[in-house]
Image (cartoon, rainbow, N blue to C red):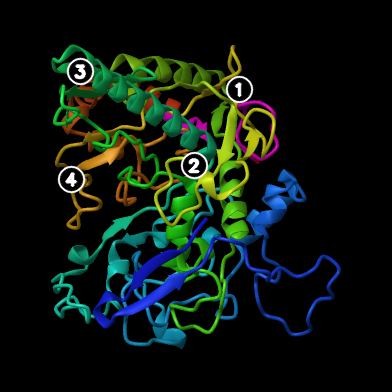
């Protein structure tokens, strides 16, 4: 897999030579006795080789992943990054140790993944108290918004100018979401390549519509010389890779999301990002997360249960839910919050072929690990579709949209990955009623307020909803309230009654 060279702390010329992506031999043998007084949360690391050669089955991997997701990490595990900020590649910062190393804005600011992802249980969303500050990690240590960062970042002037406050996203059903994005990306790229070949063969420009799974992403034009005009592309980057994670839709995979979060929020450095037997953050701990650790944490999230619908037992409420579901489509909400998308394959595979550098890729393993989203993992699971695929009732189109300028929507100051401040990926509504509050930073405490804040491309649907009689608006709300994270291990995606 070769060697990688990574520039860390460019301002001080620190270079790290990262060696081959081979899991370090830091995993304890199965029969080892526990060490008295050991305060590490991670006492056994996962060896990727044991996953690759089948010595670890899915249930073992998921158990390890759940432990990694819920473990309260300590400095003995490598939590903290005394010499680095939280971006990647990171920049050097003046050393900070102990309590002073934690910072609510620039991080690290959390002890466990489940500290934020906990509603209604580990893996879900979070209350406003768990909001994170995206892009605040670019500061060495955020303390005074009137002062520039020690690496030369200009003074943000205010907390709002330093970072984008975001509410925690729920991860239930995320394995299906990643696979939808992969299939959509592959479809869009194939359309582009067909246009390029057609233009070369005909000697004329070829303009094509970019549509996959019924979702239109604009158009592009291929020229005979092989160049492409992507000015007509909508709702996705010009590379046509659908990025389904983050409120802005800027992260490709659960693995990339996991690598980013462990470093940003916890100061935990993965081997695939930072190299084997290295300590670039200066905390004295090597190999803080093995390649296998990240695989296990990724698969745990991918195998979380599928959200569904909780139907009230009260006949009057049941009728309201049914009426609200009909109106949801009638007013146009379902144009973006698409109730169903279909997977051609029901299998989740890891790693993702669209992973960016410094995230494990298929060429780095003998074969991808895979499991059946309709048969394996936490219940409830996806429904099988005719032809070997799966039905995904996710209420999204995985496309970015301009949502207007209501103060509850367009309130960010820091642009993330080039995406305008009022543009967000369509929120997945499955399970969202179990994870209040609402909108990207939790600033809407009711579903009704979140709905009425929509504008831009959603203005017509918002106005149609607002024009409904109050009794019908109430039915739409009742329907949306029924889209919940279901109890683990229930078999169906529709259950009756309130959760006890």
Point out the tag, 3 or 2, that comes first from the N-terminus.
3
- Answer above or below: position of 117 versus 446: below
Point out the tag, 4 or 3, that comes first from the N-terminus.
3
Residue stretch in magenta: 480-499
- Answer above or below: position of 65 versus 390: below
Residue at the location (20% across, 63% down)?
A: 160
Q: Splitting the image into 4 quarters, where does residue 226 fall?
A: top left
Name the image quarter holding the C terminus.
Answer: top right
Distance between the alpha carbons at the discs numbered 4 and 2: 27 Å
Residue identified by numbered label 2 = 352
Check disc 1 and report its element: helix, strand or loop: strand
Residue at the location (44% across, 85% down)?
A: 99
Marks 1 and 3: CB-CB under 8 Å?
Answer: no
Distance between the alpha carbons at the discs numbered 1 and 3: 41 Å
Asked if the stretch drawn in magenta spans residue 495, the answer is: yes
Distance between the alpha carbons at the discs numbered 3 and 2: 30 Å
* Residue sitting nearer the eye, 208 or 346: 208
* Residue sitting nearer the eye, 426 or 332: 426
Residue identified by numbered label 3 = 199
Q: Main secondary structure of the magenta part?
A: loop
Q: Is residue 41 left or right of residue 429?
A: right
Distance between the alpha carbons at the discs numbered 4 and 1: 36 Å
Q: Nearer the viewer, mark 2 or mark 1?
A: 2
Q: Which mark is residue 420?
A: 4
Point out the tag, 4 or 2, that comes first from the N-terminus.
2
Q: Is residue 199 left or right of residue 385?
A: left
Residue identified by numbered label 1 = 383
Check disc 2 and report its element: helix, strand or loop: loop
The residue carrying pointer 3 sits among few (fewer than 14), some (14 to 19) or many (20 or more) residues within 10 Å by Cα, namely: many
Q: Total label count?
A: 4
């Amino acid at each position: 897999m070769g060697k990688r060279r990574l520039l860390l702390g460019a301002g001080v010329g620190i270079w790290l030579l990262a060696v081959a992506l081979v899991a370090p031999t830091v995993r304890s043998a199965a029969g080892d006795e526990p060490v008295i007084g050991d305060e590490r949360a991670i006492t056994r690391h996962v060896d990727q080789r044991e996953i690759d050669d089948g010595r670890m089955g899915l249930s073992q991997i998921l158990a390890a992943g759940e432990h990694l997701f819920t473990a309260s990490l300590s400095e003995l595990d490598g939590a903290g990054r005394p010499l680095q900020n939280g971006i990647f590649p990171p920049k050097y910062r003046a050393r900070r140790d102990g309590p002073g190393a934690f910072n609510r804005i620039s991080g690290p600011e959390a002890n466990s993944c489940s500290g934020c992802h906990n509603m209604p249980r580990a893996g879900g969303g979070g209350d406003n108290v768990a909001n994170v500050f995206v892009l605040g990690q670019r500061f060495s240590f955020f303390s005074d918004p009137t002062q520039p960062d020690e690496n030369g970042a200009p003074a943000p002037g205010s907390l709002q100018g330093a970072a984008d406050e975001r509410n925690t996203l729920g991860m239930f059903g995320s394995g299906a979401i990643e696979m939808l994005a992969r299939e959509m990306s592959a479809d869009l790229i194939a359309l582009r390549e067909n246009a390029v070949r057609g233009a070369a063969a005909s000697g004329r420009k070829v303009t094509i519509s970019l549509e996959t799974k019924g979702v239109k992403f604009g158009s592009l034009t291929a020229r005979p010389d092989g160049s492409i005009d992507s000015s007509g592309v909508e709702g996705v980057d010009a590379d046509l890779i659908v990025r389904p994670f983050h409120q802005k839709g800027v992260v490709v995979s659960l693995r990339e999301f996991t690598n980013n979060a462990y470093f940003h929020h916890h100061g935990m450095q993965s081997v695939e990002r930072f190299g084997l037997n290295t300590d670039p953050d200066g905390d004295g701990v090597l190999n803080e997360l093995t390649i296998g650790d990240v695989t296990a944490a990724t698969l745990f999230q991918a195998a979380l249960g599928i959200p569904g619908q909780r139907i009230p037992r009260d006949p009057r409420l049941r009728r309201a839910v049914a009426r609200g579901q009909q109106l949801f489509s009638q007013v146009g909400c379902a144009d973006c919050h698409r109730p169903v998308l279909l997977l051609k394959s029901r299998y989740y595979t890891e790693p993702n072929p669209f992973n960016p550098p410094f995230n494990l890729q298929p060429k780095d393993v003998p074969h991808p690990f895979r499991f059946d989203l309709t048969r394996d993992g936490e219940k409830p699971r996806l429904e099988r579709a005719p032809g070997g695929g799966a039905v995904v009732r996710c209420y999204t189109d995985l496309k970015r949209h301009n949502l207007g300028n209501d103060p509850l929507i367009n309130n960010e100051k820091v642009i993330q990955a080039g995406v305008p401040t009022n543009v967000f990926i369509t929120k997945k509504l499955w399970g969202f009623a179990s994870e209040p509050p609402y909108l990207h930073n939790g600033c809407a405490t009711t579903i009704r307020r979140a709905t009425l804040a929509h504008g831009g491309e959603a203005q017509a649907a918002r106005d149609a909803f607002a024009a409904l009689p109050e009794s019908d608006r109430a039915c739409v709300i009742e329907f949306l309230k029924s889209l919940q994270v279901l109890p683990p291990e229930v078999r169906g995606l529709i259950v009756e009654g309130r959760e006890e």
